[in-house]
Image: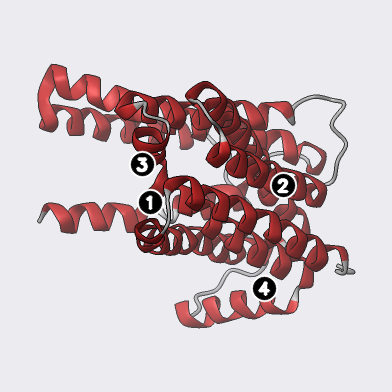
Amino acid sequence: MLISLVAGASALSTLFFPAGRSAVPDLVPDDDLTKANALLGSAANLSFALGPAAGATLFALIGARGALAFDTLTFLVSVLLLSRLPALPPSGEVKARAFLRESREGMLYVVRHRLVRGAILGLFLGVTFLALDGVALVFLARESLGSGEAGYGLLASAHGIGMILGPLLLLRRSVRATPVSIILLGLALEGMATLSTGLAPFLALAMFFRGAGGVGNGVENVAADTLLQKAVPRAMLGRVFGIYFGGVFLAEGLGYAVGGPLLELISPRAVFVVSGCGTLATVLLVWWLLSRSPD
């Protein structure tokens, strides 16, 4: 029963990001999309960073059921906050349509739109390669760097801090780069940082590179959201974001599935090198796909 409830909650949670990101263009002017996405990204990454620590503290104080009850209360507070948003205008004519037909139209739009297709395909490959290091990180900390579980926690925290700080850099008025340029820069920084983490001789240097990779990850996510919001018509935006985030979740699962057997064959450092090199190769592919798009 517990597994079924967790699976149901996870399935429902996948609706939140596409719905939320597709609503942003109705809430802020077009010129403020990057800033709005940067604030949303930093807030989400901050919650991901603080959530496990808060959960562990609550578990120690009030037990598992108490922690879950408190978690339920936070969702109710979120509902109250979101209910204060203004009513969102409908995107064109509102009519009931079949789910499969809606999904098919979304897929056809992505396939036909070169800019959107290139961005989603490139980011799918990038996330797949980057997910490889998620499997190898604990072994890199424990075996390659000799820092044990504490080192793993520090490496994971460094990446999380980078993901919080990265989007905030895009709030600077001096940032004038296009979403495509920021995606390429973010992916390149992630690839170089992952490769360098695998080659780092000691923990402190590996933490620095993990933090840099988190910065790249954070700015790339913001740029991808902004690119889709600007390139896709409002009537298609929810479906396109659904395909985009579905691809991200699928890529993470694929990366984890491949990362385990790969780790059996080669060392943790080598897995990071493969992950970094694959991500850098993805940068070239994304550049080729997006630079040739007239859309």
Per the model, the C-alpha gap separating discs 1 and 2 is 30 Å
Mark-to-mark CA distance, 3 and 1: 30 Å
* Secondary structure beneath label 4: helix
Residue 249 disc label: none
Colouring chosen for the image of the structure: secondary structure
In this view, 255 is above or below 165: below
How far across and down, in percent of the image, does residue 185 sit? 76, 44
Q: Indicate which disc residue 110 carries.
A: 4
Earlier residue among tags 4 and 1: 1
> Which of the two discs, 3 and 4, labels the residue nearer the N terminus?
4
Q: Distance between the residues labelled 2 and 4?
A: 24 Å
Q: Name the residue under label 1.
A: 13
Residue type (three-letter) at the residue carrying disc 3:
Phe
Left or right of 216? Residue 10 is left
Residues 189 and 235: in front is 189
Identify residue type, mark 2: Ala
Residue 183 percent coordinates (x, y): 73, 49
* Contact check, label 4 and label 1, Cβ < 8 Å: no
Q: Would residue 26 be visible to someone looking at this image? A: no
Is 41 located above or below residue 260 in the figure?
above
Q: Residue 188's mark?
A: 2
Q: In this view, does 72 lie to the left or right of 47?
A: left
* Residue wearing tag 3: 139
Q: Do the residues labelled 2 and 4 touch (CB within 8 Å)?
A: no
Q: Which amino acid does label 4 sit on?
A: Val
At 61% from the left and 65% from the top, the residue drawn is 240
Q: In this view, does 27 lie above or below 39?
A: below
